[in-house]
Amino acid sequence: MLALLILLGYLLGWIVFNHPPKGARFPARFDRLAARLDYYPQSMVHQVLSSMGELGSALCMILGVLAVGSEYGWETFKTMLTQRPTRLQTIAGRAVALAVITLICAIGLFAAAFVLSVVIVSIDGQPLQLPTVLSLLEGAGALWLMFYVWASFGMMLAYVFRQSAMAIGIGLVYLLLLETLLLRLLGIIGGAWVKDPTDVLPHSVMTSLAATFTGGYHAAGEVIAAPAVSATQAVVTLVLYAVAFNIVGAALFRNRDVT
């Protein structure tokens, strides 16, 4: 995730805007010099969320699957459950561990973005404008919540299929493809009733949450679509998803055979 953030989230775009390759074409009314502001510290919250919201979520979903599915593959659950911890204690410890790991990932990404953005603004010789501490905390919290929801989703899939391969495949199909296709289909159908499901689907809610940190405008002056739901509604919805995924996983693990 750090490599993706550094290379795709910062260095590649900044180099292209500063030294566009021969024959490069930019959209009309696009100010590539102003677009460099996206790589400066004042824009780091938006940049991290837009760069890592989807890619990081996919990796955290895989992490959640492997945290559970590997135990099925190694058949270590059998040994584990004959010892002192109960099934609910086992799944609770795993959920807490993933919460800590995803929090470390979110903080690490913001720390890397801070250092990199300060270096970039210094190279460009522009004044240093730091984001507020509150915006950094809110952004890191939002990224952590996104990561943990998808990690919980991955754990739930591993409990459902009792393996890693199928769970990763289904999870990636949903995360990267299925919800997008569903939204397109609903958009074609149209009607007032379409808005309600699109406001509660996890990927759409996360997109809305990330959009609340943009202020409505890209650094180059492009207007960004307004979020479909408020930040408060998005956070509440994601918390409910995380709780639901853990409850479903716990119910399956407690009541079914390991094999």
Image (tube, helix red, strand yellow):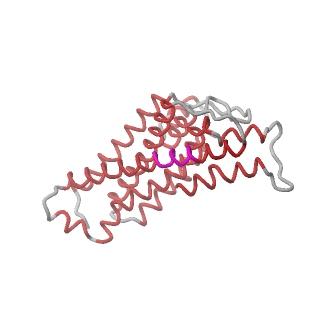
Rendered location of residue 256, percent (x, y): 23, 59
Give the quadrant of the C terminus.
Answer: bottom left
Across the whole image, how many numbered discs are drawn on residues? Answer: 0
| Residue stretch rendered in magenta on the structure | 107-115
Main secondary structure type of the part rendered in magenta: helix
Q: Is residue 225 left or right of residue 170?
A: right
- Extreme residue in the bottom direction: 74
Q: Which residue is painted at 14% across and 63% down in the image?
A: 83
Residue at 75% x, 51% y: name it. Answer: 16
Residue at 52%, 57% in the rendered image: 173
Find the residue positioned furthest to the right. Answer: 23
**Residue sitting nearer the eye, 217 or 237:** 217
Q: Position of residue 226 (x, y in %)?
A: 61, 30
Seen in the picture, residue 131 relative to 164 is either above or below; the reply is above
Q: Decide which of 98, 106 is in the foreground and name it.
A: 106
Q: Is residue 29 left or right of residue 137?
A: right
**Residue 137 percent coordinates (x, y):** 46, 35
Q: Where residue 37 appears, x then y in whole percent?
A: 69, 38
Residue nearest the observer in this picture, 225 or 35? 35
74 lies left or right of 137: left
Residue 126, magenta (yes or no): no
Front residue of 97/44: it is 44
Left or right, 236 with reference to 50 = left
